[in-house]
């Protein structure tokens, strides 16, 4: 954590600024290990964690576990957080304070501006997100653990893909199995989209019962120590896929493999997206692939970098991204396959290992 704060201080001095106000939840956790409510004010000498009485103990624990330089400031009862931060800035004579524009509402921005005084609050974007692009060994281990929990949980629900079982039963059992295995939570509301609903890329689980022969798109993930995993599998209820289902499943698998083949350090992210898109375009199904190929995964389920046609990112070692091509045909259904992948010098390291098959 100390390395991260040092990097941020270098950025501060390059920008000739006195402090950085961190308001984004994941960014605050990344720099302090504190998961409660509050903001972080990083100055050249100190890191102030501004929170309230409810989180005092959590804050103290995070401060002790971290770099030992975090001082805790609790706002007074009834006082607005921006007012507490404003007082702190005035006491420590901070004149130029960068703040995360993308993590503050317009209303909160106005409050901070008033509390800090005219011209002292400077908008800044994407700085900590940029630092989070490449994962450390510890971060990779946490994502790997989240993926392992997720894989094991999915294995236990495979017998449930049968006629009459409701989407929600699968979703709830998947969640239960993850929590029993120590997950801190689910990475997002799971997608269990069966039958014609499978053409909805984000079709959350409903009480709809599955019917034999239908496709089910199942998108799930776990959280371990703040880090997420993300997997999608598509199955046919009760086995016995049709020739068309098998044909399109193999096409999506080929699109995914084509993208994984080019995913390595130094490659433009747009080329990874293009590799998968080409396979589906060549089959006349380019229009059915309605989203980007993938996204970064870490403290947030969707973060930088993006693997998409307009991306300017160059893939780097240590990035963790999803590779998730899909086909969505309204009136027929849909198929998506998704892996969470760490980029290494030797190529992609696939962290999600649940079996990839259309029928069980
Ligand atoms: Zn997903
Ligand atoms: Zn995803």
Image (cartoon, helix red, strand yellow):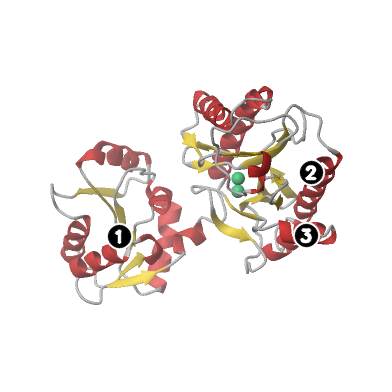
Between the C-alphas of marks 1 and 2, the distance is 56 Å
- Residue 282 in the image, given as x and y percentages of width and height: 84, 61
Which of label 1 and label 2 is nearer to you?
Answer: 2
Under circle 3, the secondary element is: helix
Residue at 75% across / 36% down in the picture? 356
* Residue at mark 2: 249
Left or right of 54, for residue 219: right
How many marks do you count on the picture? 3
Compared to 242, does 90 lie above or below? below
Between the C-alphas of marks 1 and 3, the distance is 47 Å
* Residue at mark 3: 275
Compared to 79, does 141 lie above or below? above
- Residue 109 in the image, given as x and y percentages of width and height: 28, 66
Residue at 76% across / 60% down in the picture? 286
* Residue at mark 1: 45
Between residues 183 and 12, which one lies in front from this camera angle?
A: 183
Near mark 2 (Cα within 10 A), the count class, few <14, some 14-19 or many ≥20, is many
Tell me which corner region of the image, top left, top right, bottom left or bottom right, holds residue 265.
bottom right
Left or right of 78, for residue 330: right
Of mark 1 and mark 3, the one earlier in the sequence is 1
Which of label 1 and label 3 is nearer to you?
Answer: 3
Under circle 2, the secondary element is: helix
Between residues 6 and 184, which one lies in front from this camera angle?
A: 184
Under circle 1, the secondary element is: loop
Residue at 49% across / 47% down in the picture? 299
Q: Residue at the far front: name it.
A: 331
Asked if the residues shown at circle 1 and circle 3 are in contact, with their CB atoms under 8 angstroms apart, the answer is no
Residue at 42% across / 66% down in the picture? 10
């Amino acid at each position: 954590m100390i390395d991260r704060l040092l990097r941020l201080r270098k950025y501060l001095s390059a920008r000739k600024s006195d402090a950085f106000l961190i308001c984004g939840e994941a960014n605050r956790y990344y720099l302090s290990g504190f998961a409660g409510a509050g903001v972080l004010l990083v100055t050249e000498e100190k890191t102030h964690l501004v929170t309230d009485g409810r989180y005092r103990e959590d804050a103290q624990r995070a401060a002790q576990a971290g770099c030992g330089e975090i001082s805790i400031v609790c706002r007074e009862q009834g006082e607005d957080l921006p007012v507490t931060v404003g007082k702190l800035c005035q006491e420590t004579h901070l004149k130029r304070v960068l703040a995360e524009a993308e993590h503050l509402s317009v209303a909160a921005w106005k409050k901070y501006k008033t509390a800090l005084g005219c011209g002292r609050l400077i908008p800044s974007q994407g700085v900590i997100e940029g630092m989070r692009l490449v994962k450390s060994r510890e971060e990779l281990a946490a994502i790997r653990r989240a993926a392992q929990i997720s894989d094991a949980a999915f294995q236990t629900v495979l017998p449930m893909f049968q006629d009459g079982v409701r989407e929600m039963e699968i979703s709830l059992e998947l969640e239960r199995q993850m929590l029993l295995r120590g997950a801190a939570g689910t990475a997002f509301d799971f997608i269990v989209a069966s039958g014609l609903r499978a053409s909805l890329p984000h079709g959350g689980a409903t009480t709809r019962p599955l019917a034999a022969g239908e496709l089910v798109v199942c998108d799930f993930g776990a959280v371990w120590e703040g880090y997420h995993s993300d997997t999608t599998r598509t199955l046919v209820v009760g086995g016995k896929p049709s020739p068309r289902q098998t044909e399109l499943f193999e096409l999506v698998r080929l699109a995914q493999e084509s993208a994984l083949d080019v995913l390595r350090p130094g490659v433009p992210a747009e080329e990874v997206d293009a590799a998968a898109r080409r396979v589906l375009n060549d089959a006349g199904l380019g229009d059915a692939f309605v989203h980007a190929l993938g996204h970064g995964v870490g403290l947030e389920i969707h973060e930088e970098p993006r693997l998409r046609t307009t991306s300017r990112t160059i893939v780097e070692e240590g990035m963790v991204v999803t590779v998730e091509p899909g086909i969505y045909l309204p009136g027929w259904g849909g198929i998506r396959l998704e892996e969470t992948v760490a980029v290494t010098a030797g190529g992609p390291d696939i962290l999600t290992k649940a079996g990839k098959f259309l029928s069980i």
